[in-house]
Image (tube, rainbow, N blue to C red):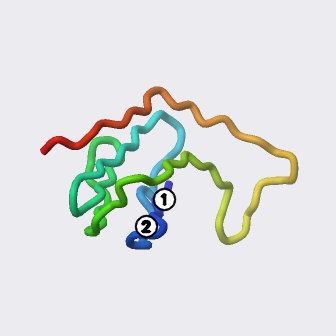
């Protein structure tokens, strides 16, 4: 799993490159003034220091690979999403 930000401070990283994908995992991000924080299974795994735009798209995306080993044409995947929410920052 990886994260990547566009536009305000382009940055990215691999969240859990050595994780076994044989069971469920949780992923979350927090956008607060001055930074975006990324969590995997409750552990902080990345942080970007920058002012996040007031309005921006939020995309859940699946890719088979970025550098080879691509999925076969016509293949598909299901992303099971239990909960997505967005709050207004009041702090």
Is residue 8 found left or right of 69 in the rendered image? left
Q: What residue is rendered at 70% in x and 40% in y? A: 77
Q: Nearer the viewer, residue 3 or 75?
A: 3
Q: Which residue is mark 2?
A: 13
Q: Residue at x 72, y 69 (%)?
A: 68
Q: Which mark is residue 2?
A: 1
Q: Choose the circle earlier in sequence order: 2 or 1.
A: 1
Q: Which percent across, then down, holds residue 48? A: 30, 66
Look at the numbered discs 2 and 1 and tell me whether their residues touch, using CB distance below 8 Å.
yes
Along the line of sight, the residue nearer the viewer: 71 or 32: 32
Q: Residues within 10 Å of mark 1 (few under 14, many from 20)?
A: few
Specify the farthest residue to the front. Answer: 54
Report which quarter residue 9 is drawn in.
bottom left
At label 2, counting other C-alpha atoms closer than 10 Å, the crowd grade (few under 14, some 14-19, many 20 or more) is some
**Toward the viewer: 21 or 9?**
9
Label 2: state its secondary structure. Answer: strand
Residue with the most extreme right position = 73
The image quadrant where one finds the C terminus is: top left
Relative to 44, does residue 23 appear above or below in the rendering? above
Where is residue 51? Give x, y as percent: 28, 65
Please give the label number shown on residue 48. Answer: none
């Amino acid at each position: 799993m990886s994260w990547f930000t566009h536009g305000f401070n382009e940055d990215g990283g691999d969240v859990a490159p050595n994780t076994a994908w044989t069971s469920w995992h949780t992923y979350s991000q927090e956008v607060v003034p001055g930074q975006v924080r990324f969590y995997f299974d409750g552990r902080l795994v990345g942080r970007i220091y920058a002012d996040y735009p007031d309005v921006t798209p939020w995309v859940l995306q699946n890719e088979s690979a970025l550098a080879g080993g691509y999925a076969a044409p016509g293949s598909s995947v299901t992303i099971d999403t239990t909960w997505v929410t967005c709050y207004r920052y009041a702090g």
